[in-house]
Image: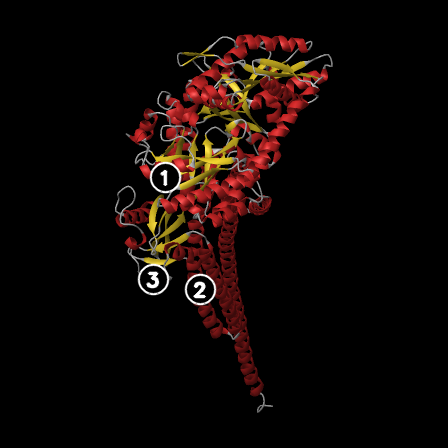
Amino acid sequence: MILIGPRPATHRTISMRKIIVSNLLLIMFLVGAASGFFVSNIGWWGLHRGAQDLDRLYDSSGAALKQLSDIEAQLQRSQELFLDVLRKQQLSPADKGALVHSDGEVRQQLGKLQHDPKRGDYWAQVSHLYNRVSNSRERVLALLDKDPAGALRMYAVDTASLSNQMFTELHQSLPQIIEASTRSYERGAEFNRDSRLTLLAMSMLATVFFCLTAALTYREARERRRKSAELDREHTLFRTLFEGTTDGVILRSKDRFIDCNRAALKLFAVPNVQAFAEMGLGQLQPMEQPDGALSAAALLEKIEESMLHGSQRFEWLFKSLDGREFPAEVTIDSAHLLDRSIAQLTVHDISRRKQNERSMRLANQAFENSLEGMTITDDKGNILTVNRAFTTITGYSLQEVVGRNPRMLSSGRQSQEFYKEMWEAIGQSGKWQGEIWNIRKNGDIYPQWLNISRVVDDHGRVTNYVGVFSDISERKSAEERILHQVYYDQLTDLPNRVLFSDRLNQVMNQAKRNSDLRFAVMFLDLDRFKLVNDSMGHDAGDQLLQQAAHRLRGSVRSADTVARMGGDEFTIVLSEVRSPKDACSVAQKILDAFRAPFQLDGEEVYVSVSIGISVYPDDGASTDILLKNADMAMYRAKSSGGSWYELYDEGLGTQASQRLAMETALHKAIERNELELHYQPQFDCNTSKLVGFEALLRWRHPERGLLAPEAFLNIAEETGLIVQIGEWVLRTACTQAQAWRKEFPGHRLMAINLSGRQFQSADLARQVSLALQHSGLPHFCLELEITESVVMHDLDASIAIMHQMADLGVQFSIDDFGTGHSSLAYLKKLPLHALKIDSSFIRDIVSDQDDAAIVGAIVAMSNKLGLRVVAEGIEDKAQLDLLKAYKGIVGQGYLMGRPQTAEAISKMIADGRPKSAFA
């Protein structure tokens, strides 16, 4: 018992100690484990919360930058589509669809962004600006079709400024987002360092206490790597947005460039960022700005000022490395990057905007400097503004008309119904144009040509009316003069053939509506007119025609029409006659009026008249038949000895027989060689050199003697003999011209007149070719003459024929130029070589300033077109002396030489020029 007694005690003591130590170790273990667990969890929880905060910060910055980039790209596309439409100055369906689609995308994106809890107010402001821009664009597009210049003015004044304000608002937020993202990146780096220290301490504590902390450390390290990767992705996103903006973005420290985006490289034509960083400020801009400031120093000063005092915004002129200068809107903001102060320059190229501004200024200048008056009113018609031409035309200043209605200018000539129809047209089609009579401030009433256009807003509501007008007083006077020339004979001031035909048709239509109405047609021809004209000259002949016209007008009622058909032929329409006896009474009155002598150049000359009468409906049911029958009756009166009148009856078939006899005789004349050519020489008025001839047809009638073309050409034209006669003239004239070339060497033209029927003949080219071939005459020595009326009868066909002749080398001239109805605009289309001024203009060139002016104008125009000028009808020395003032004019007339036989011309050439004419 004693041996083992103490052992239990000792055993108990030892056991107790073990128990106490074990308990202490257990307590320490539990405390250490709890402490490690507590500290570890506290550290992990802090890291987790920090990472979440950073997540939100980076997500917010990245999302904001992406939103800004996306919406700016959409707005830029929308702006480019709109500017493209303005450049084309028309809105096609495709362009309209593209604009509507782009507008829908922008509005949808802005609608989503307005729900952003942090930047919703900002996006609401951008959305409001875009709505204003969109509304302004629609107004511009609505005006584009009607008034492109007005649309450009509206764009520059309203739309461009709103667009610039919208893009400025976007660009202002970019530096703030970039700086926030940069600060996030720096905080992430700091957070990374702090997390490493925290995890190291926790790892040591966990290692000291227990291995449990190692597991937690591994977990946090893995989380840290994930966060670091996310930071790298955020930086990549920032860089993507930095590169994605269309504006050039440049980062610069105090002394050098640090970085730039691709847009900046493209804008300044720099190959890469490294090259950009090595450049100085002076390389990116001209030496001086438009205001004379030294560019480099001034820009550096603005950069430094932005670093000290905040954002700077201004316009600047830059120059790229390829030498292109361009204006830009520059925004400089200060920022901090890695503990450094930097300046961020955002460069927005405004070349297009400046161009648009110049276009708008040009449009404004066009508005103010336009020769047409312009008026802009509100939707009620009250005047808002007018241009200078308005004041010049009306006499009213801007201050006198602003707020008033344009009806203040009404002259009262137009009825209320006129204005009602005008406004109805504007209401239906949106525009109206027409002639209107208004009154000036001084009381003068004048005509104007007015265009009124309606302007509507996006909702179709009328906002304005634009009126553009021109004073057409001079044009109206000119039109009246032209119409008078078109419808009246210039010599006698009687209605011409055109107006007579119109009035005859009017009377015919009235008679067809009223079966009781009868009217008469008279055809008159002066007896012995040709004798007077040939013996006393053209001046006396013109005086005779004028006095005869005066006597004819005095012999009829005002309701009747007296007209000159041409030459010495006149026609009369007696609008209402009860019987043929009434027409005979008027005819007798005319005969009595012609019994008195005519005073011609101080001499008394007796000239009678032959009259033919036809009556509707007895002598014809159409105007053509009535004229034809009256003409036949006139021929019978003339064949009776003249100074008489004849009513048409069927017995006039005798006269037709006579004409048939003339036709037969003309056939025989060709067979018997009774036709012959006389030649009238043409001289250079300045040098008196003989330059050519005109071949003139004559008929040596076995009974009636030598006949001029007027006696038989009409019959030849009607029967078609003119083509055969014309071919004979071509052969004979070409043969004679070649004979003179051999006998008297030298270059001289042979001019030959072509009738209308011969000119339009399909056989003309063959005839001309054979005539040149058989005679041996060079093609450049032949000139074909045609009248204006022949050319204008079928202009397209005439052009084709003349080009066909030109291919043969034959020259063309227009005969009797100035007396027909051709348009000067068509002269350049015709292969012409010469213009022959009609003798009617040469006759009074010395005494009549108008004729002299016309001749001068024709000569000037011909010189511009490279055409020769031939003046016909030179009869005295004064006319020749006056024409010598125009260099290079070719003259033809009795003063230089009458038409003569070939033998007489040969003698003239042998003797030299006509001495009397050029002495």
Farthest residue to the front: give it. Answer: 702
Q: Amino acid at mark 2?
A: Asn
Front-most of residues 515 and 667: 667
Mark 3 residue element: helix
Q: What label sits on residue 192 in the rendered view? A: 2
Residue 262 pos. (x, y %): 42, 58
> How far apart in space, not on screen, are marks 2 and 3 (Cα)?
34 Å
Q: Are marks 1 and 2 in contact (CB under 8 Å)?
A: no
Q: What residue is shown with label 1?
A: 691
**In the picture shown, does residue 490 fall above or below 248?**
above
Label 2–label 3 contact, CB within 8 A: no
Residue on which disc 3 sits: 275
Image spot of residue 740 (x, y percent): 39, 43
Please state the horizontal and vertical placement of residue 538, each as a whole percent of the image: 43, 22
Q: CA distance from mark 1 to mark 2?
A: 108 Å
Q: In the rendered view, does 548 fall on the left or right side of 537?
A: right
